[in-house]
Amino acid sequence: MPDDLKVVDITDLAKKLNAIAQTGLTYAKDVFDRERYETLQQLAVELIGSRFDIDAKNWNHVSEVGYATPKTDVRAFILREGKILMVREADDGLWSLPGGWADVGDTPSVAVSREVKEETGLSVNVTKLLGVWDRNLHGHPPYPWHVYKLTFLYEEVGGSLALSHESTDIGFFDINELPELSLTRIVTEQIEVSMEIATSDRPTWFDSFDSQRTGINSTPRSTPVAVYCIDVFKLYSKCLLI
């Protein structure tokens, strides 16, 4: 493992370690196996905590139980006279497509429709799935979770623009004059590809096996669990200094 470790390398390793530990704790029956997985999860807690200022007592807000799976973020792509609807996020003052986490019990498209209504005041109908993006592979800042991002094309059917507690401004923007983006939520590539697909017959975007192998955060799936465990002990003494 190279000495000049990047933040994304440590974050990706910590997420994988936590997922292995979470799934192991779900299925392990042997008491010694459970102790090992608990130790592995504690190491993941400390690694992720060093990157995101999360201490052990608040880990329950990040950690989950059961088989570890990616979270789902859903976004709406809405055009009016060729311009893209965007909202200024209240928490960072930067711009994104309307949307957020998908709620349990909702289909992805219904979840986005509700988010659009809450954030912008508009009523919309879904017309097309534009893309399914692996957040790890497209230049987003590091994040505690592994996330899949779904982008849908919508058309307006009613309502009027209105602000909410989640957004401080709303506007339609030309693809060549985008505002400063909230990169934890959306990156330029996703907007540009969505525009191409929304205005053409191009099929839905998805990350291929090749993109996973060459992605900035990707790790070959064949890497043994033991290698992650060895790596984390090598990283542990360095992670707080990076």
Image (cartoon, rainbow, N blue to C red):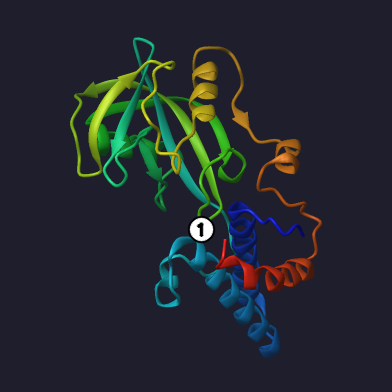
Say which residue label 1 marks.
144
Residue 224 quadrant: bottom right
Instruction: Write the residue at 43% across / 68% down.
Output: 54
* Residue 175 vertical position relative to residue 145 in the rendered view, above or below: above
Q: Position of residue 97 (x, y in %)?
A: 38, 32
Q: Nearer the viewer, residue 166 or 152?
A: 166
Left or right, 152 with respect to 8, comes to left
Residue 86 quadrant: top left
Q: Position of residue 27 (x, y in %)?
A: 65, 75
Left or right, 230 with respect to 40, comes to right
Q: Amino acid at mark 1?
A: Pro
Residue 94 quadrant: top left
Q: Position of residue 239 (x, y in %)?
A: 59, 66
Q: Position of residue 145 (x, y in %)?
A: 52, 56
Instruction: Write the residue at 64% across / 86% down.
Output: 35
* Residue 171 vertical position relative to residue 225 in the rendered view, above or below: above
Q: Nearer the viewer, residue 126 or 228?
A: 228
Instruction: Write the residue at 32% across / 26% down.
Output: 124
Q: Quadrant of the C terminus?
A: bottom right
Q: Residue furthest top?
A: 81
Instruction: Write the residue at 44% across / 41% down.
Output: 185
Which element is circle 1 on? loop
* Residue 40 vertical position relative to residue 218 in the rendered view, above or below: below
